[in-house]
Amino acid sequence: MHPSSDSLLIDRFGRQINYVRLSVTDRCDLRCVYCMSEDMTFVPREQLLTLEEISRIGRLFVEMGVDKIRITGGEPLTRKNILQVFESLGQLTGLKDLTITTNGTLLSSYAQALKDAGVTRVNISLDTLDTERFKAITRVGKLAKTLQGIDAALEAGFQSVKLNAVVLKNRNHDEVHKLVEFARQRGMDISFIEEMPLGIVGDHDRAEAFYSSEQIRNDLLKYYQLTASNESTGGPARYYRMPDSNSRVGFISPHSHNFCDTCNRVRVTAEGRLLLCLGQEHSIDLRRSLRAHPLDDAAVRQDLLNAMQIKPQGHNFNLALQPVIMRHMNTTGG
């Protein structure tokens, strides 16, 4: 069933929303310095969307023209019984791409079940290949568990297993070529991400730690020949190819090359706020809509259509200022 044109999610600027990031939890088994503060207060469990509500949201979005859903967190695999959401979404006609962003620590147990449920692609966060640095950046993590998770994902045979690395000056910026080499050896893509100023993390000065996509690319050009590609996976990454490898190198650059003019996505937080922009607070309370209309999908669809009228043209990140956006990355949904 194709959605009718009047049910498509099109904002005031003519951009059609076909990509939704659904956060299923704000909790995580790591404490990455760019994502959350060390002493995070998490949302009380009773305030989270239920698994059934998450599945319902996914279905409604697909009925309105969304063909890509990414499940995020926190760490989504820490949510109890989360596989039932993947199994539910994996059966939706019209959904072409069901993906997950994960830190990889639990993939050894979950990779095959995710593949069987219909997950097409897996993005795994890996910021360093150094055991001590990994513990410093994640505060509590063990590199070996994430590496085992990467192996398990590759073995399961997803369409794509990609690495994501957030680059911080003097933390891991000198490792970017090692990370690319790691990806190349395994036939994986890798994206480098400029840190986003969400929430107060207390660990570092973001302006001082900022390392731009251009700086990373220049560092990599000492080792690899990079050729710009117009390929896309539906998100904001700009990809480069290398002549001697099938691996691609992507750059996600919210500061140096913002991607707002082609924004095709919205986010739903674990407690059911529909965020219309990563870098703005424009949102609606989708949980209230779902619970006010438990059997009336048309009313929820109308709320989603109405929300398109408050999607802003773009974000206005500024590293020189204290974060205007006080929510942390783990509550935002990746």
Image (cartoon, helix red, strand yellow):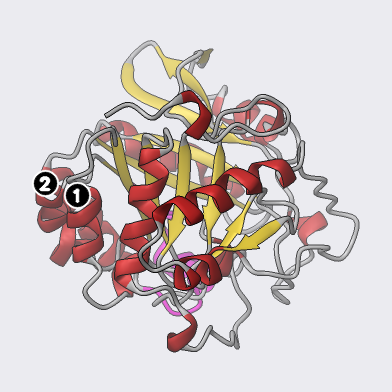
Q: Is residue 318 above or below residue 333?
A: above
In the rendered view, does 152 fall on the left or right side of 209?
left
Identified by mark 2, the residue type is Ala
Label of residue 90 in the image: none
Q: Amino acid at mark 1?
A: Ala
Q: Quadrant of residue 108?
A: bottom left
Residue that carries the numbered disc 2 in the rendered image: 156
Q: Residue at x 62, y 27 (%)?
A: 15
The answer to which image quadrant residue 184 occupies is top left
**Secondary structure type for disc 1:** helix
> Cβ–Cβ below 8 Å for labels 2 and 1?
yes
Q: Is residue 218 part of the magenta span, yes or no? A: no
Q: Where 69 sits versus 202, above or below?
A: above
User: SS of the residue at dot 2?
Assistant: helix
Q: Quadrant of the N terminus?
A: top left
Which residue is pictured at 30% across the width and 68% down the height? 52
On the picture, is 91 further left or further right than 260? left
